[in-house]
Amino acid sequence: MKNVVFIRLMRLKKDWKSLLCWMLLPIVMTVLIMQGVVTWQEETRVPIALVVEEQTEMAARLVDDIASTELLHIQFIPLDEALHKLEQHELDSVFVIRKGYEDHILANRRNQLIEAYSSNRSFAYRAVVETITSYAQQDAARSKAAFVIKQLFSDYGMEDEWSYEEVIESSREREKSEALLRSSFSYYDKENTAEEQTLPLLKAWGVWAFFAIITTFFLFDWMLKENRPSMRQRWLFTEISFKKYACLSLLFFTVIIFLMDLVTAFIFSSLFQEAWTIRVLISLFTFRLTINLLAFLLANVYKQLFMYYISGLGIALLLIVVGGSIIPMDGLKGKWPWIEELSPVQSLLDGTIPLTWLFVMIALLTVWIHKGGKANA
């Protein structure tokens, strides 16, 4: 073992730059792509101006609801400036919350609560109007419900039981504590109710897995370089066989690369709020071990570096697509649970261990060690 580590360290003196580049590439590319997606999402948000002329609690809540809409980029500016930007087509539309908004809501008057301005280039005007109108209608519905409840209290002699404001506040608390909107799905007569969730456009670990698989194949090209025909005769005069040297080198590279994976997990937890738990680390280690074994065994099949690289790229694309990194596989998993076993990427995204892949890789490695037949591509 010491001799192998010594040989590998000697090789690293020459190849450390390329090794470091290949190990850093997945992190760098993932950060760049994820930041690019965030920037693209920001640029594709609809720019609107919101002019608030009433400083009441109900108007403030309406503004907070509108500002929480992910697809809107809101500017809080005076009306004159907003209309000027609208004429210059810098804004899609302008909305004004006039004075008296709360009074109109409490008086059950729903017309002309909000003024809207648009231009001939307001491509998202109708959708934005519907979104903002829905928030205003929620206030109107709460007010109407509170009015009806107070009337019922009055009819039954319980005027001091609930105040008007308490009824509205209770309604808002109920919305926060309970999921009022649910979607029901059924697969093979099995019903499941799930809350509506907003899924990210890309997953950081999914993007990282693609580049990690590719770079792993490039990192393990030493198997071909150090066992090429001109090098094979030298192994006859060494103390250890090439198989033992290769297996110990596999262990060496696995440890080195996994240390970089730990750095990756720490960076992702800081930048993308990814979980940093023992389960995630175990899943990451088993994924790394599986991919390293796959690259190691594939390198034993080929003689030509070019064919090895091409096969590695193809396998990486296949595993990423089947693993649900690009196209979500949640619906297919509900129908065919075995689809999770087709790619170790799916196990990485789910935080589980790719038992099938790991078992197959270890079995093939055992066969290679004991039989050692090498096929040529």
Image (cartoon, rainbow, N blue to C red):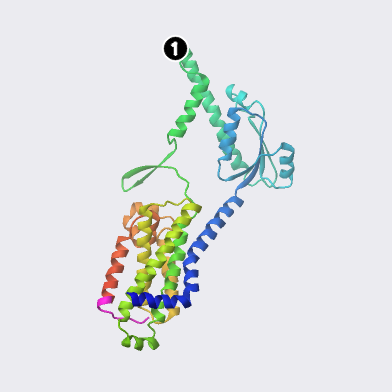
Q: Which residue is mark 1?
A: 156
Magenta segment's dominant SS is loop
Residue 77, by quadrant, is top right
In the rendered image of this protein, does residue 146 appear above or below residue 25?
above
- Front residue of 223/12: it is 12
Q: Quick check: 118 left or right of 17?
A: right
Report the amino acid beneath label 1: Tyr
Which quadrant is the N terminus positioned in? bottom left
Which quadrant is the C terminus positioned in? bottom left
Which residue is found at the position 29% from the left and 72% from the top?
365
Secondary structure under tag 1 reads loop
In the rendered image of this protein, does residue 94 appear above or below residue 324?
above
Which residue is found at the position 45% from the left and 75% from the top?
12
Other-residue count near label 1 (Cα within 10 Å), few / some / many at <14 / 14–19 / ≥20: few
Q: Which residues are magenta?
A: 369-377
Viewer can see residue 347: no
Asked if residue 261 is among those painted magenta in the image, a careful observer would answer no
Q: Quick check: 46 left or right of 215?
A: right
Q: Position of residue 39 (x, y in %)?
A: 58, 54
Q: Position of residue 147 (x, y in %)?
A: 52, 20
Asked if residue 370 is among those painted magenta in the image, a careful observer would answer yes
Viewer can see residue 43: yes
Q: Position of residue 335 (x, y in %)?
A: 34, 53
Outermost top residue:
157
In the rendered image of this protein, does residue 26 appear above or below residue 62?
below
Q: Position of residue 368 (x, y in %)?
A: 28, 76
